[in-house]
Image (tube, rainbow, N blue to C red):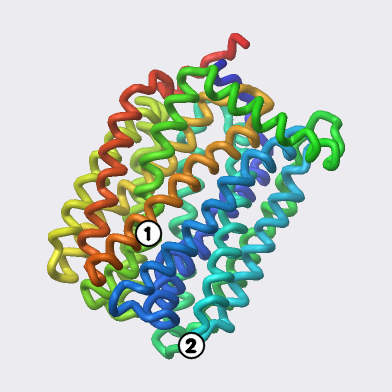
Amino acid sequence: MRMSRRGGAAPRAVVAWVLYDFANSAFAAVILATIYSAYYAIGVVGNAEGAGDLWWGRAVSLSMAIVAATAPFLGGIADRSGARRPLFIAFTALSVAATALMATVEPGMVLWGFALGVLGNVGFEGAQVYYNAYLPDLARRGMLGRLSAWGFAVGYAGSILALLVALPAVRAGAYGVAFLTTAALFAGFALPALVLLPGAPGRGVSILRAAREGGAEVLAGIRRILGDRDLRRFFGAYFVYEDGVNTVVAFSAIFAAQTLGFPMDRLIVLYVVVQVSALLGALAWSGPTDRLGPRRVVMVTLLQWAAVVVAAYFVETQGQFYAVAVVAGTGLGAVQAASRAFLTTLIPRGAEAEMFGFYALCGKSAAILGPLVFGTVSHAAGGNQRLGILAVGAFFVVGLALVARVRGGGPTLAARESPS
């Protein structure tokens, strides 16, 4: 059961797919990683004793739990019925709508802000399942790593644009305007993918029948993973290390704002710098991912992430944090692109959405624990975020040890045909 890929797709479909990464990165940058997370934790809830960390950790964890619980089931429905495209559109629309409604959140609206944070992230992560499932259909043989990396690189460019567009509104204290412009960017640049990406062929099964058979499909998927050594080991490793990645992304802005005193406008500049470094990192590792194999790239970047969180614990100045953030950024682009390519080399033909549903299950259910660990440690320590970030480092160390046991994920330039 190894890679057997098509000859690639029409250039306009590839461009539309890459542009979607540009689009949804507006949400990742402005809502999840910087402005809304910091505004909610510090401005809406109040974070003097870590209460904002706790509430934001709950929002991220709950949204990830919802995605984790539903992604394999919905992925199986998409594969059986060919409903990948409608589900892709629906989840994207949910995230865009929630982002626009964040303009109504004011200080003290803890539950309303919490609900919108959960819905926005459910839509963002849910759509990502179907977006990722298009990768093996679009990539030419030997181009999986590079196309995956190009998507992430363009996504980081989208993050930069979204942050620069939001910056004037943030400086004026008009956070609602920043959230509305983010929703507009997300919707506008997502439109080509929603229109041009083809529907999956499916297996001639209606959506209602596919839903009825969804439980059996999920169980079959679990048996497929457990019965395949490489898939089983990959998902176990990814479950752990992606937890650390998602947690650092979700709390980096809050850490910088509270512990190091970054004002909101300087926080945006910091994140733009991180996105530039992530873009360069994704591009720099795109070729090696195909030549050396995504497994080796993941292992190197996990070592890098472990070093980053230890350095963050000792950081005392904003200048030092800039340096740490740049190093983290180069590893962020590489580990995300390589992980997606890694799984793609292992997926049996016809199970793309299903396996990427389990990919979401592992990545997002793992991210249930990390934000809770950070938020709980910070709150228990009276708002000491340094202890929270140090605790997250354990996820990278354990993840590295588990990745070392995976035998798949070799060079994608020498594509192997599936024996089954």
What x and y, as percent, mark residue 220? 66, 25
- The quadrant in which residue 179 appears is bottom right
Q: Say which amino acid is labelled 2.
A: Ala
Of the residues tagged 2 and 1, which is closer to the observer? 2
Q: Which mark sits nearer the N-terminus, 2 or 1?
A: 2
Q: Residue furthest bottom?
A: 172
Callout 1 environment at 10 Å: few (<14), some (14 to 19), or many (20+)?
many
Q: Nearer the viewer, residue 72 or 159?
A: 72
Q: Is mark 2 on a helix, strand or loop?
A: loop
| Residue beneath the point at 42% across and 44% down | 336
Residue beneath label 2, please? 174
- The quadrant in which residue 139 appears is top right
Callout 2 environment at 10 Å: few (<14), some (14 to 19), or many (20+)?
some
Q: Which of 419 and 413 is in front in this view?
A: 419
Q: Which of 363 and 272 is in front in this view?
A: 363
| Residue beneath the point at 57% across and 13% down | 417
Quadrant of the image for the N terminus? top right
What x and y, as percent, mark residue 103? 57, 81
- Asked whether, in this view, residue 376 is left or right of residue 78, the answer is left
Residue beneath label 1, please? 275
Q: Say which amino acid is labelled 1.
A: Gln
